[in-house]
Image (cartoon, helix red, strand yellow):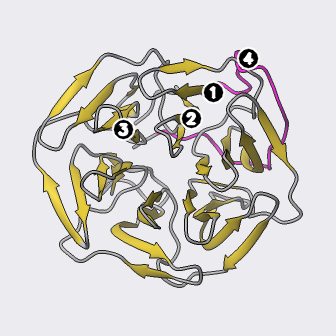
Amino acid sequence: MLLLAGCGGTTTGSLPTPTTPTSPGLRGDTWTWDGATFHAAGVPGPPARDLSALAFDAARHVYVMFGGQASSGYFGDTWTWNGSAWKQMLPAHRPSPRRGSSMAFDPVRQVVVLYGGQAQDQVEGTTSGDTWTWDGNDWTEADAGPGAPDVRDGSRMVTAGDRVLLFGGRHFNVDYFGDAYTWDGKRWTKADTSPRPPGRIGAAVAWDPVHSALFVFGGAGLNADGGGGAAGTPLADAWSLSGRRWTSLPAAGPPPLAFPVGMWNARAQRVMVLFGLNCPDPSADAWAWDGAAWTRLARPGIPARWGAALAQDTNGGALLFGGSDQRGC
């Protein structure tokens, strides 16, 4: 099974140097993508963490990050990145501290949407099914849940044209989901039909605007030999959701990877899959899917990691923060 950092009390703090890790295995570095290359920002930022949620707020032209995990517990803080500096926000309201939430910008309602995750408690965490929105100043609980899609953490969410799409997730090492939902401002509704991908947590996902399709690779699925608190088994399959129909992409590509990240390379017109945990070692590799075949790319020059947060802006840029270089499985 995957080895994840432990739980505990809520962790807070602000603007440590990115070169000084605050917990073994965790990273607090910031990287920007200019459409062709990643660059180290080398500026102070949020405390080191993994499994945080990150989205680009297109209405306010900043990235927004919420939550995540450190060795001492879960975060419940909100940060923005304006392209050159991080700023910790102090909203009047906020979701409870948690890891494994998903976020994306809703272009119709002009807010960032956050869903679910594993919330802080005194044991292993409580899987959430609540939905929150961020308007640039404060969080609003839009749906307390747990209606559809019920409780889950490790889902992925993307902006898909004029809507958001939520994919996958799990409720402990018991129920894994491979379905997709969309948000209408009040409720989540099913956005796909069966047959679906096998359920998983922490997949690499990206929206392919050329084919109007959601791309999914890897993640971690059911660990049949583990108990309810066990992490999942890394996967190496790829899928595409076009309209409401899923298609398996059979070409061989990256090895099984848990908690990689995915992004759309607008300049090259292809999906990229980066990093992840290739048991037992974190990966520093990069792969590209062009719609027909995989290509192993030159490494992007970022230290190996899994559980990083990545989001893309509307001009082909991207931001990557944190993750863990801890060995596991």
The answer to whether the residues at label 3 and label 2 have Cβ atoms under 8 Å apart is no
Residue under pointer 1? 30
Dot 2 or dot 1: first in sequence order is: 1
User: Would you place residue 138 above or below residue 262 in this image?
Assistant: below
Residue under pointer 2? 319
The answer to whether the residues at label 2 and label 1 have Cβ atoms under 8 Å apart is yes
Which element carries disc 3, helix, strand or loop? Answer: loop
**Region in magenta:** 3-30
Query: Which disc number belongs to residue 266?
Result: 3
Please report the residue visible at 70 percent of the width from the left and 52 percent of the height from the top.
60
Which element carries disc 4, helix, strand or loop? Answer: loop
- Which of 90/149 is in front? 90
**9 falls in the magenta region:** yes
Q: Amino acid at mark 2?
A: Leu
The answer to whether the residues at label 3 and label 1 have Cβ atoms under 8 Å apart is no
Q: Amino acid at mark 4?
A: Thr
Q: Amino acid at mark 1?
A: Thr
Between the residue at mark 2 and the residue at mark 4, the CA separation in whole angstroms equals: 20 Å
Q: Nearer the viewer, mark 3 or mark 1?
A: 3
